[in-house]
Image: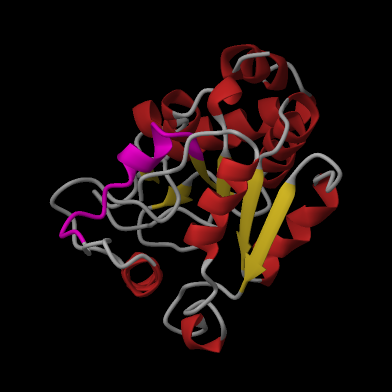
Amino acid sequence: MSWKAFLENQAQLPYFITLQKFLEEEELLGKTILPPKALRFNALKLTPLDSVKVVILGQDPYHGVGQSHGLSFSVPEGVKVPPSLRNIYKELAQSIPEFKIPESGNLEHWAKQGVLMINSVWTVEKGLAGSHAGKGWETFTDNVISEINNVQDNVIFLLWGSYAQKKSRLIDLTKHNILTSVHPSPLSAYRGFFGCNHFNQVNDILIQKGKSIIHW
C-alpha cells in the first residue's frame, strides 16, 4: 500500500471525518492552523511508505508562524533552529566526528533518505501549544505506525521521551528495532539524550540489514 491509499482509507473512517470537520470549523472561525494545509502531510509526501527506514516521532507541531512545515523537529530554511533540534545537532556532532552543525534547521534531506519525521498530533492553532491534542490525530498516528509495522521490515523507531515510548506497543520487535532515550528538549537532554549514540546505531543496524546508511 502507498500513503495515498492509506490516506484514502483513513478518510472514510469516523474518527478522521470528525477530525476534518473540527479543522474546517476552526478555519471558518478565522483561526490560523499550522502547518499550512498544503504541508500537513509533508512527511508522508517526502518519505514514501516503501522507502521508510527510520521513524522519528515528535509530539506537537511548532506553533509559531513559519516554523512548522510538516516534519517533526524540522523548520524551513531561514527559520531559527529550535532548542530541541539544536540538541539533536549537538549529539550528532559529539557522536559523528565528521558532522558539522548546519545553520539550517531544515531536515528534508533526512526525509528523502527514508527518515519519516512525524508528530503524534499533526496540527496546532497558532500560538497555542497542544491545542489540537485529543481531536483524533493520535489515532491517525497510531494507524501510520501500525501500517509501517505491518507492511515494512527492519524499520528503526527512535522513541525519545515517555510520550513517544508509549507507541512501542504498536511495534513488532521480531520485525523492527526500537531505540529509546529521553527527549532532546533542553529540559531533559542532559539526562541521557546526549551520549545516546542513536545516529551511529541507526547506521550500524542499516548496514547489518543490507540497507544504505543515512547521511545525517
- Figure quadrant of residue 185: bottom left
Q: Position of residue 41 (x, y in %)?
A: 47, 30
Q: Position of residue 151 (x, y in %)?
A: 75, 24
Q: Position of residue 213 (x, y in %)?
A: 46, 41
Figure coloring: secondary structure
Say if the magenta span includes residue 113.
Answer: yes
Q: Nearer the viewer, residue 173 or 21?
A: 173
Residue 17, compared with residue 181, is above or below; it is above
Q: Nearer the viewer, residue 25 or 111?
A: 111
Q: Is residue 123 left or right of residue 215?
A: right
Q: Is residue 203 visible?
A: yes
**For the point 68% across and 25% down, which residue is it?**
17
- Figure quadrant of residue 96: bottom left
Q: Nearer the viewer, residue 153 or 68?
A: 153
Q: Which residues are magenta?
A: 102-115
Q: Is residue 32 left or right of residue 132?
A: left
**For the point 49% across and 60% down, which residue is it?**
200
Q: Position of residue 197 (x, y in %)?
A: 51, 69
- Figure quadrant of residue 4: top right
Q: Is residue 57 visible?
A: no
Say if the magenta span includes residue 125.
Answer: no
**For the point 54% across and 25% down, which residue is it?**
51
Q: Is residue 87 left or right of residue 162?
A: left
Q: Nearer the viewer, residue 88 or 167?
A: 88
Residue 124, compared with residue 4, is above or below; it is below
**For the point 46% across and 63% down, which residue is it?**
129
Quarter of the figure that contains the N terminus: top right
Residue 150, compared with residue 8, is above or below; it is below
Residue 182, compared with residue 79, is above or below; it is below
Number of marks drawn: 0
Q: Main secondary structure of the magenta part?
A: loop
